Amino acid sequence: MRVRNINGTSGLSCKCGSWLDHWKKHSKQTASYCSERSCMSSPEVGAHIQKDSSTDTSWYIVPLCHKHNQKATSLEIIDERVLVSANQSQTCGK
């Protein structure tokens, strides 16, 4: 799946403690590696992303390493990775 990282979201906070914790809690998954298809680095952040070339403009969270979180370009992520809504009213804000 192709996604685009959204830069400028580092000031946003979540009740879960961190966006990576938010992803873990609501995806019910663990991530040993960054979500970028060819990256073997550990996930360090819960990154805000949007689906690339989609009519879906919602924001989602996926685990990424710092290197891939720096890029606002399109990334190919592994298909098995669950996208968790960044909209807290749908997740931890209920």
Image (tube, helix red, strand yellow):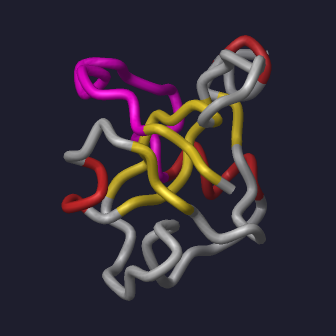
What is the quadrant of residue 60 in the picture? top right
Identify whether 91 is placed above or below 12.
below
Question: Residue 27 location in percent, x, y?
Answer: 75, 54
State how many labels appear.
0
For the N terminus, the quadrant is bottom right
Q: Is residue 10 magenta?
A: yes
For the C terminus, the quadrant is top right
Furthest residue toward front:
53
Quick one: 92 or 10, which is closer to the camera?
A: 10
Furthest residue toward top:
89
| Left or right: residue 23 compared with residue 14 | right
Question: Residue 65 location in percent, x, y?
Answer: 30, 65
Question: Residue 72 location in percent, x, y?
Answer: 30, 36
Taken as a whole, is the magenta stretch helix, strand or loop? loop
Name the residue: 41% across, 38% down: 5
Q: Is residue 82 magenta?
A: no
Region rendered in magenta: 5-20
What is the quadrant of residue 89 in the picture? top right
Identify whether 55 is placed above or below 62.
above
| Left or right: residue 37 compared with residue 70 | right
Question: Residue 93 location in percent, x, y?
Answer: 69, 16
Identify whether 73 is placed above or below 24.
above
Name the residue: 40% across, 42% down: 18
Name the residue: 75% across, 56% down: 82
Name the residue: 35% across, 79% down: 42
Identify whether 22 is placed above or below 89.
below
Quick one: 77 or 19, which is closer to the camera?
A: 77
| Left or right: residue 69 compared with residue 16 | left
